[in-house]
Image: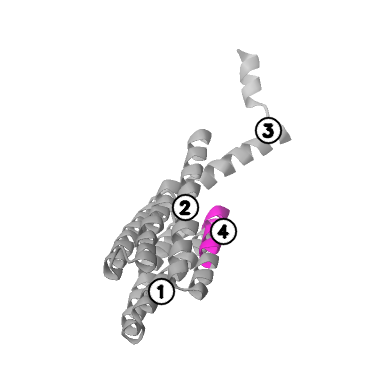
Amino acid sequence: MDRLDDDDDRPLSPEEMLRLIEEQQATTVRRLGGDPLLTHTPWGITWLAGFGALYLNYAYGLLSRSTALAVLFALMLLSMSTTFFAQRTVSGQVRGEAADRGMMYGLSWMFGFACVVAICVRLSPLLPSEETGLLWSVTSMAIVSALYAAGGALWRVRTMFFLGAWLAALNVAGAIAGPTVHALLISVGAGGVFTVVGVVQWMRQRGGA
C-alpha cells in the first residue's frame, strides 16, 4: 500500500507533463470552440436553401424574388440567433474578460445586420430589381464572413477563421460575376462546405470525447 501511495505522489516525468498539457489544451479548445452543429451547420443549411431559392429565381424564374429573399432572411435570422446562443453557451463556461468578449461578439452580429438593413433599404429603390437582390446578398455575406473570421481570431479557432475567409472569397467572386452566379456560389460553395465541416467536426468531437 505504501508503495502505491509513493507511486501516486511521485513527480510527473517531462513526457507525462507534456502529454497532460496537450490533453488539457485539446479539451479547452473543443469546449471554447463551441458545438460545430450550432456554429457551422445552421449557416450551411441556410445558404443551401436560401441562396438555392434565389438561384431558382434568377436562373429559372421558379420563385418570385420577394419569396426567395423572404426565405433567405428568415433562415439567416434563425441562424444568427443560433450562433448567438452558441457563443453565449461558450462564454457561460468562462468568466471575466473572456465572457465579456463572447457577449460583445454576439451583439456584433445584431449590430452588423442592423447596418445591412439600413443600407439596403436606403439604396434598393435606386437599383434594378436583380441588382437589389445582389445588394442584399453581398452586404449580408460581407458581415457574416467578417464576423466569422473575427470569431475565429478571437477564440483562436482556425477552422472558423478560414471558413470566414472562404466565404469572403466566394462573396467577392459572386459580386463581380453577378446575381445568378453569386447565388449559386454561396448556395453550393458556402452552404455545402459549412454543412459538411460542421457535421465532420461534430463527429470528431464525439469520437474524441
**Observer-nearest of 86 and 47:** 47
In terms of sequence position, does the residue under pointer 2 or pointer 3 come before the other?
3
Mark linked to residue 134: 1
- Does the magenta run of residues contain 74? no
Instruction: Judge by depth and name the residue closer to the eye, 34 or 99.
Output: 34
Q: Amino acid at mark 4?
A: Phe
Nearer the camera: disc 2 or disc 3:
2
Q: Quadrant of residue 53?
A: bottom left
Mark 2 → mark 3, Cα distance in angstroms? 41 Å
Residue 177 seen anywhere in this rendered image of the structure: yes
How far from the left and from the top, in percent, is residue 177?
51, 73
Query: Can you see residue 35?
Result: no
The three-letter amino acid code for the residue at tag 1 is Leu
- Residue 16 screen position, x and y as percent: 68, 33
Disc 1 to disc 4, C-alpha distance: 24 Å
Badge 2 marks a residue whose secondary structure is: helix
Q: Tag on residue 200? A: none
The range drawn in magenta is 155-168
Residue 16's disc is: 3
Marks 2 and 1, the one that precedes in the sequence: 1
Amino acid type shown at disc 2: Gly
Numbered tag placed on residue 192 in the rendering: 2
Q: Residues within 10 Å of mark 2 (few under 14, many from 20)?
A: some
Residue projecting furthest to the bottom: 126
Give the residue pinned by disc 4. Answer: 162
| Of the image marks 1 and 4, the number of the one nearer the N terminus | 1
Badge 1 density bin: few <14, some 14–19, many ≥20, Cα 10 Å? many
Assign the N terminus to one quadrant of the image.
top right
Closer to the observer: label 3 or label 4? Answer: 4
The secondary structure type at the circle numbered 3 is helix
The answer to whether the residue labelled 2 contacts the one labelled 3, judged by CB atoms less than 8 Å apart, is no
